[in-house]
Structures are given as C-alpha cells and as structure tokens.
Amino acid sequence: MRETLEKLSNAHGVSGSEGSVYGIIRAELRGSVDEIREDAMGNLIAVKKGGSFSIMIASHMDEIGLMVNYIDEKGFIRFVTFGGWYAPTLYNQRVILHGGKGQVVGVVGGKPPHVMDEEERKKGVKAENMFIDVGATSAKEVNQLGIEIGTPVTIDRELADLAGQRVTGKAFDNRVGCSVLVNVLKKLKSPHTVYGVFTVQEEVGTKGAKTSSFSLDPDCAIALDSTFPGDHPDIDKKDSCLEMGKGPAITVSDANGRGLIADKRMVRWLRKVADAKKIPYQLEVGHGGTTDASSIHLSRGGIPSTVISIPVRYIHSPVEVADLRDMEASAKLLLEALKGKPDL
C-alpha cells in the first residue's frame, strides 16, 4: 500500500490533467481486472465481473493545483487556482509547470513581508496577488520553455516517512483513496460486478462522478476519499471527532446535508461487516466539503450511496499526513463487505 501511495502521491494530476496518475493506476491493475477502459470524460473504469448486482467504488484521481492565465513582459506568470486552496499554504511554494516541452520548475512569489504595512501582514498575500517565477526574464523566454496560457501547475513535493506508520506528502486527497482501491481490486473476490472508477475533476465539482455513475447505473455506490481529523492542536473535537489511526470514517452525512445524506442501508451494511470482522471504524457527520458520492447518489433515479474516508491531516496542503493503518483498515472493510451486499 505504501509503495502504491508513493507512486501516486509523487505523480502530478491537477483537475482535467490526470493523465500521469491514470497511467500509474492502469499499470498497477494490469492482469488484475477483467476489463479496464477510459470513458469520454477521462474516468478510468476497472471492472471485476460477477453477477447482475453491481457496486460502484469511486475514488478521484485529481489534485488541487493551478493553471497559467497570464504571462507578463518580464516573464512572471499569473495563475488561477483549481480546487480549494488556502492561500497562505501556497505562498512561496516550489511548483512544477507541465508545459508542452516537459516539466519546468518554478516558485510561487509575492510581495515580501519586509515591505508590507501592518494591515497587509495581518491579511496575508492573496492568491490573485501571487505569481510564478521560473527564472525567465521575458514572456518570449517563458514561451520558449513550452509554457503558455492554460499550462497546468502542481506542487513540487514528494512523499516522506514520519514516525510509526505515518507518511506525509502532497495530493493524499485523494491518492490515499486511489491506493486503497488499487489494492482492493488486486485482491477482490466478489460474487457481484464491481466497478472500480478512478474519477476526474472531483475537486472542481465532482464532474467525473456525475458522468460515470450515469453511464454505469450501478445498484449502489461507495466513494473512497479523505477527510480531516480533529486530533491535533487548535481544532475542537466538535468540529471533527475523527482521529488518525482509529480506522476509516463511514459517512452518515456531509456538508450539513447539502452534499450527501448517506443511505441508511449502506451505512448499516458497512457497520455490520466492520463489527463482525473487528475492523476499526469511525462515523462522520461533516459540515465542510463533500465527495463524489454527492453526485453519484443523485444520478438517474437515485443510487444508494455512502463514503469511506481516510483521515488525513492538513488536507489541501503540500504536507498532508496519513496513517497507513487507516488505509489498510479501509481496504479490509471493502474486501469483506464486497463478499456480500447491502439489504436494499
């Protein structure tokens, strides 16, 4: 699981440009599934064939990132953000621009604090006031590097080990889920047809989940994603009662009910399996973001859905932290659950 996560975390795939992640997953699953294909949207669909009852497991491949939208005459590059960035985590980061001639390293710059007045220091630098410096001195030089309007940009960061079973890296949201799903599909033995769907463009509107769930029309679905725990300083347990190392979270509801209100039968099914097999798990009622399941459960006439989420600290930053034991428990829960099905 760790090796797969390292490959996927170190890969680059901002929303709409998930190709390198797609390639790694396809190579990992070669020979382990009955069918693997890409749909018109770019979702990667891996099929383990079984009976007429079908279950969709969705895990998004994309990560938050940037896109070039202007290059000034001195070679400084302006950008728009893709996904939910908190600007202070982006300021002064090293990035990779994925241009037409290959990768180009740059840094995110902005007004230095030395020349900020007191009010500016309090507010911090906004993303729209930042720029990317690739060392060029003109727009022409930037273009010669293969960078143009529309070039995608990702954070330059690689996975590293922390103490115990914990690791840190970029894009754990949601390469942790992708790693779990790859592991599950390799080992899966189910009487049902299982669609492992590695979705695109989740961070910008759960778009891949909308199209893939409509075309596959499964009997039920589970989204595999990440969520933030409340087990570190300066966060109240009332904001998140989840803890790392205590197993995945089964979602009851997210985004104050505006996203997903999980199907009670799906939640009951997963809890029953976890209790029977003594797999640690937690329950989550979230008030922040949502997942692919919010789109899947509204597809066609409605698809019973819930979410299995892996707790990840410092989510939507370049230094996210995950516990490999939570990933392993997530995989075990899915492998055991998929031997049966929910009572729908």
Image (cartoon, rainbow, N blue to C red):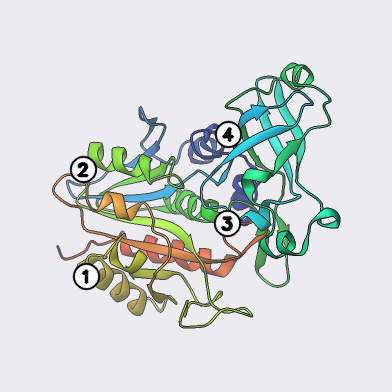
34 relative position to 117: left or right: left
Q: Is residue 64 above or below residue 152?
A: below
Q: Please name the amino acid that badge 3 sits on.
A: His
Within 10 angstroms of label 4, few (less than 14), some, or many (20 or more) residues? some
Residue 255: horizontal and vertical position, in percent?
36, 64
Identify which residue is drawn at 45% across, 82% down: 238
Instruction: Pick whichever of labels 4 and 1 is earlier in the sequence.
Output: 4
User: Does the CB distance between marks 3 and 4 fall below 8 Å?
Assistant: no
Identify which residue is drawn at 66% across, 35% down: 78
Mark on residue 264?
Answer: 1
**Residue that mark 3 sits on:** 316
Q: Please name the amino acid that badge 4 sits on.
A: Ser
Residue 224: horizontal and vertical position, in percent?
41, 56
Tell me how far mark 4 sits from mark 2, CA to CA: 27 Å
Q: Is residue 26 above or below residue 125?
A: above
Identify which residue is drawn at 69% across, 44% down: 130
Instruction: Pick whichever of labels 3 and 4 is earlier in the sequence.
Output: 4
Tell me how far mark 1 sits from mark 2, CA to CA: 20 Å
226 relative position to 211: left or right: right
Identify which residue is drawn at 27% across, 43% down: 213
Q: Residue 43 occupies which quadrant of the picture?
A: top left
Q: Secondary structure at mark 4?
A: helix
**Residue that mark 2 sits on:** 217
Tell me how far mark 3 sits from mark 4, CA to CA: 20 Å
Mark on residue 20?
Answer: 4
Observer-nearest residue: 230 or 125?
125
Asked whether the viewer can see residue 110, the reply is yes
Q: Secondary structure at mark 2?
A: loop
